[in-house]
Amino acid sequence: MKNQEMIKFCLDTLMSSGADKAQCRYTEAEKYELNIDGNELSLARTTSNINIELSVIKNNRLGLVNLNKNDKEEIKAAAEEAVMNALSAPEDLAFDISPTQNSNSFKSGEDMPDKERMYESLNEFLSEAKVRFPFLMINQAYLSFNTRNIYFGNTNNTFFNERKGYYELSMMFLSKKNGKASSFNAYGYSTKDLKKSIMESGLVSDMLKESEEHINPKAYEGKFVGEVIISPDCFEEFLHEITRISLADQSIITGTSKYKGEIGNEIASGLLSWSSSPTSDEIASGYRITSDGYEANDIDIIEDGVLKSYLLTQYGAKKTGLDRSGSSGGAYIIKAGNTALAEMIKGIKKGVLFNRFSGGSPSSNGDFSGIAKNSFYIENGEIMYPLSETMLAGNLFELIKNISEISKERVNSGSSIVPWVKVPGITISGK
Amino acid sequence: MLKQDLSKFRSLFSGYTELRVQENRFSTIQLVGGNLVQNVSNSSTGVCARTYKNGSWGFASSSVIDDDSVKAVINASKENALFLDNKKSKGQGPIADFKLTNSIDFTTKKNTLSRKDKIDYIKEIDSYIATKYPQLFSRVVMAVNQDYEKNLVVSGGVVSYSMIPRTYIIISLTTMKDGKPITYTDYTGKCAQFEDFFLKANQHFKDVDLMYIKLMEKAEGEYAEAGAKTCILDSSITGILAHEAIGHTCEADFIMTGSIAADYLNKEVGSPLVSLVDFANNINGETLGVPVFVDDEGTLAQDATIIENGILKGYLHNKESALHFGVKPTGNAKAYDFSDEPLIRMRNTAILPGKSKLADMIASVEDGYYMTKTNNGQADSTGEFMFGVTMGYRIKNGKLGKAIQDVTISGVAFDLLKTVDMVSDEMTWNNVSTCGKKQPMPVGMGGPAIKCIVNIGGR
């Protein structure tokens, strides 16, 4: 079946199985990938997969089934199962499908992988890394080309199609010299093409350099409360945690969100402006269709420190009586600041350049503590030494309130554009 | 194709080849505050092939399973291997290619419960919480079923079928204290389908009552002091230590790419009280939470001793690393989905029990903590680890004191193991965890309680 027909077939089957309302998302995914293991190219891979997500509302009850077969008989069986799932579920008036919207098609990125260019890119990268970073060991890395062809439809006659192609690089690495090893570190980015070399992309060369510097780390002796410069990678991770515990459906519905009732209020430093921009051309792996079946919009979450929006789906909005956000989250862009990173470092009396957080998920009250990995101790404006066994503790909500500087420089990882961020008042404890 | 003999496709193989048809079936039911927020069934079915050529690998997979698709996947895997080998041949020798037949099936023999029956079961637990503890700020009850069904043939003559399920339940209770939410979470899981594990909803009620008591203790808890402290780590934390901080550093792929444990083979890495094993599928005849009988390369699974009486004895291997080290593989190669290649994975990893009583261990601590629950953890090539601890108690002069708020503990695994001076005589298993090494993989982890020194990241 062609894909548009597939959607119609699924919807018709769901309705004839007894649904009151139905929704279907059909995705074709193809991947070509080259893997590195232990500094050597090791594996070439081609995969293809489909996913069909069937959603049913019956008597205000929700049933969901996912399958990866497009055989008609399998779809019929799955449709019946979805309806049975709905009938078994409790009633909730907040369950619904998205309303009628203008149909739309979206396309971004290339259609096919450039396999030879992919091989060359990795080979060039390995050769250059061997010369510039002789003690580097790449545990694993992969460069993949991914295509996603997504068809969405519901029984309110809304139909969307999104086709995207993008490259993704992910790597895990460490450095070892004279029997001593650094911490491992990991980095990844996505991009629409391979015009830029791997070494020039994102934070790749910075992180490889820092990896070698980390072969002989020292634990900080003692404990102090100091200033921390949070790297873009690390800050993005914190943004996802803030989303989980205070902006997404569950936190608002249950009332555990710190930001309940705070729309329009100042909840962060006036320096912070944070958007979710899934349709931005600058974001390689964005999306055009939200998880709740709407055309995606770019939205401001925080503007000049003021909370502008939660990240509520249609379900969360109906449940709480609040506005639905136009984005499903992710694709975060932070507005650049006014201070050069070098100046931010110079301004620190005693603190840490915090590159990777290794810690438990922050609790719903925002408290976090974890190890500062691949990080450096700063004293009197100078980076003194790489740190080991040093823990940082604080609170995420206080952290974004107390941001004192934001860097001019930002890093585009393909899934976000984030600067460095300086924050005081973090407890740093070593041995 | 999941239950058919795939041997007829062997004639298409070129050299060492694995052919696997796999179906993963997942079901999640989650109630949040009595609202059904997740009621979903997923299945993922497909076929894959992996071909080895002089040290390069080709892999291909497809979600379509018919004869033509299987042939196409085998050919694509051959082409991918050739692509790399033609670019630069590594000249590596052949890897082990066994011959064995195996079939293991944990499908329930009882009547399958309907979706409604399963939801009603979870609702009954939720109702018990809501009725008995109406003052709670929020509650979450979640039940997950995972079935992993695999049909494997390998060029040397392996024919292996397995259906390995996992079922678990997670309950979270939240109260408010001074405007801040405090949460306590507990879980239990088993290698079984729903029908063979969840018999009556009221079997969970006493666990819920105990959870509420602990939640109230935690609400009155204090922040732990930062710094190095003597701690009793209960089995939940010992298990994650065994997996994260020691197990990962001993996986041969990390050994070959810089793990600190590469320098420690046959050396002392812990006190003589410490022994650590990655179990394949059973202890004393009792099936473990994540059993492996034949791995996804067709290797018969056996227990792998990592540490024995404080000495590092061995690593965890796949066929390629076993060739490199000149040892036999022990069945640690597993793939998560049909579109994944097998990687070196842990199975059921545990520190072995000792001889001390937990009460004596607590009584021996002048100033420290008894840590009982964790929510996650990470570890490093250097052996440095961190775990989130979500429940624990102060110990002062050998007695348990106030509970503590969420905290993170850290250390260097092989340094910590050398400080172990007591190991309890009982052990329990955590069968609900997932290891995130490239592919999400169910893992079992367990252990007794141990007394040691760890760093605490308090305020």
Image: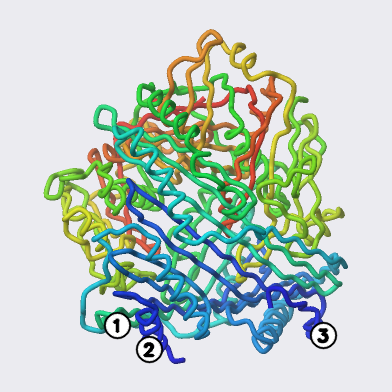
Q: Secondary structure at mark 3?
A: helix
Is there CB contact under 8 Å for labels 2 and 1? Answer: yes
Residue A55: percent from the left, percent from the top? 37, 71
- Left/right placement of residue B197 relative to residue A260 reads right
Mark 1 vs mark 3, foreground winner is 1
Residue corresponding to mark 1: A159
Q: How is the image coloured?
A: rainbow
Above-or-below relation of A26 to B411: below
Q: Earlier in the sequence, mark 2 or mark 1?
A: 2
Q: Residue at x 58, y 51 (%)?
A: B435
What residue would you read off at disc 2? A4
Q: Secondary structure at mark 2?
A: helix
Q: For the residues marked 2 and 3, what is the alpha-carbon distance in whole angstroms?
A: 39 Å
Which quadrant would residue B22 be assigned to in this image?
Answer: bottom right
- Decide: is B433 above or below A190: above
What's the residue type where badge 2 is placed?
Gln
Looking at the rendered image, the quarter that the C terminus of chain B falls into is top left
Q: Which is in the foreground here, disc 2 or disc 3? A: 2
Which residue corresponds to mark 3?
B11
Q: Is the Cβ of the residue at disc 1 closer than 8 Å to that at disc 3?
A: no
User: What is the quadrant of the N terminus of chain B in the image?
Assistant: bottom right
Left or right for A416, reference B310: left
Whether callout 2 and callout 3 share a subunit is answered no
